[in-house]
Amino acid sequence: MTQATASSNSPHFSRRRFGKAAIAASALSYGRILGANDRVAMGYIGLGNRGDQVHDAFLEHGDNATVAICDLRDDYMDLAAKKSASRGAAKRYHDYRKLLEDKNVDAVAICTPDQWHAVMFVAACKAGKDIYCEKPFSLTIFEGRRMVEAAAKYKPVTQVGLHRRSAPEIRKLAEMLKAGEIGKISAARSFHLRNDWPVGIGNPADSAPPSKELWDAWLGPAPAQPYNVNKTFYNFRWFYDFSGGQLTNFGVHYNDTMRMLMQLGVPRSVTALGGKYVVNDNRQIPDTLVVLWEYDNPATGAPSLNSYEQYNGNGAPGNIRNMELEFRGTLGTLYMQNANWEIVPERNHSIAPKPRSPLDRDESEFRGSFKPAMAAKQGKGSASTAFHTRNFLDCLKSRKETNCPALEGHLSNVGPLIGNIAHKTRTHLQFDAKTERFTNSEEANKYLHYEYRKGYSIDL
Ligand SMILES: NC(=O)c1ccc[n+]([C@@H]2O[C@H](COP(=O)([O-])OP(=O)(O)OC[C@H]3O[C@@H](n4cnc5c(N)ncnc54)[C@H](O)[C@@H]3O)[C@@H](O)[C@H]2O)c1
């Protein structure tokens, strides 16, 4: 395999040319029946920033080996091959379809940019592979539903990379809140805070791609467009053809934790405001964004008001504990940062206040009745991805449902995706969970999917 060759405007894209022959969708490579002591044969599609982390998180467990790797970059594949060499040599591919045809592969990890997830996930289902797929599950609502249908039809074991779902400390919190630990929750807030002013990700000009084939392979189903180095490795998440921005990057983790801890479905309504107000780079996504969702909260029988606040022109704390998530209950407030948490008790009054009157300003009885509603509590834990990969490996063997199967991954992505649509249309949107369509805006419904480039499909 050739090494990556440096180019003038991207040190990343290899000039290596790939065979152009289209590879027909493979015949099913029926998965092996795995016993408890078997080593799972893993294939990786995408070994960049996250793929490398996921690979490490699988290698933390002894019962799997890396048998196949696929990426557009040879240097990334070199690193992955080196990391897994002690468990045998990994076969290298530049075309994921060839990896999917490899009968030695039991399961694949898909860690490519978001626009690729649906196409690769559906192809992996058809190829008979079990699938670990990174979040956000899909780029559009339509894709996510189609992926859920593919999983239901081909029945792979699926795990979506919302890895906090497998963290023991977070699972414990879910049980505590379910049992009413902080009372009735009326609101949950989340924050993505980082001051990117002034330069952000920089402002490189569009240019000729270092390799037409590689730019094409990067775009996948996304619309044809001029090459810009910021639309590629890692920085693609600031552009809507490849990502839903920080709202589906960090925001999908927050929304997933809210859904898990509050037992929520998908929002009944959403609105959002914000824009690119202060940062001077070529990003498309807002540097300042507030999204508000109304969820039906089964614990109260009423809605809850959940929010995502993104301040990328200012990094000041979002709340008094400077933690990314907060759950406001009638008895206490839960603050969370990954798997670390603290509950600050509420103080509730047991008698109603007298109406204020100029004739009697004594409020001592009312004020004296305030009592802490519960004891303060805190905990620490790890949200390591290794818990999530362990759960996936176990489920490959038991054929049980994982902690975040395709449907959960899709449902947790719905809130962020419709948040972006509300922002684009500047509307307060009503969402119907059954049809997964908006009921009060046909304009918004147009954003539920987009037209793939020719040659890309998620047909089942
Ligand atoms: N769960 C998490 O906490 C977490 C963290 C970071 C990223 N992610 C997700 O992981 C995904 C990848 O993000 P990243 O930060 O690793 O980006 P990245 O740009 O560092 O890596 C993406 C990799 O995909 C490869 N790739 C692109 N098109 C390909 C194709 N057609 N065939 C094979 N390989 C291809 C690229 O060469 C690159 O190495 C995104 O969906 C992102 O949201 C999840």
Image (cartoon, rainbow, N blue to C red):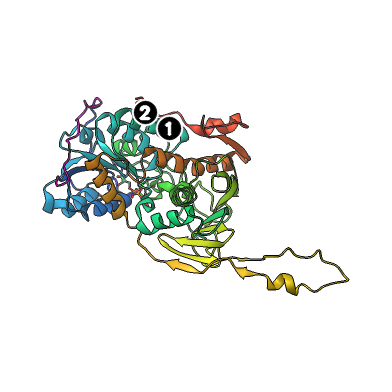
Q: Nearer the viewer, residue 87 or 97?
A: 87
How many C-alpha atoms fall within 10 Å of the one at disc 2: few (<14), some, or many (≥20)? some
* Residue farthest to the right, as pictured: 359
Query: Mostly what secondary structure, the magenta segment?
Result: loop
Question: Which amino acid lies under the numbered mark 1 shown in the image of this protein?
Answer: Arg
Picture residue at 63% right of the left edge, 40% below the top:
428
Q: Is residue 68 visible?
A: no
Percent x, y for residue 113?
A: 36, 43
Residue 235: which numbered mark, if any?
Answer: none
Residue named by callout 2: 458
Residue nearest the viewer, comparing 263 with 48: 263
Q: Is residue 25 above or below residue 11?
A: above
Tag 2, which secondary structure? loop
| Label 1 crowd (10 A; few <14 / some 14-19 / many >=20) | some
Q: Is 277 on the left or on the right of 99, as rendered?
A: right
Percent of width and height locating residue 427 = 63, 39
305 relative to 9 in the view: left or right: right
Q: Nearer the viewer, mark 2 or mark 1?
A: 1
Highlighted range, magenta: 23-38
Q: Is residue 433 above or below residue 261?
A: above
At mark 1, the secondary structure is helix
Q: Give the position of the N terminus as an image quadrant.
A: top left
Whether 33 is among the magenta residues is yes
Residue identifier under label 1: 145
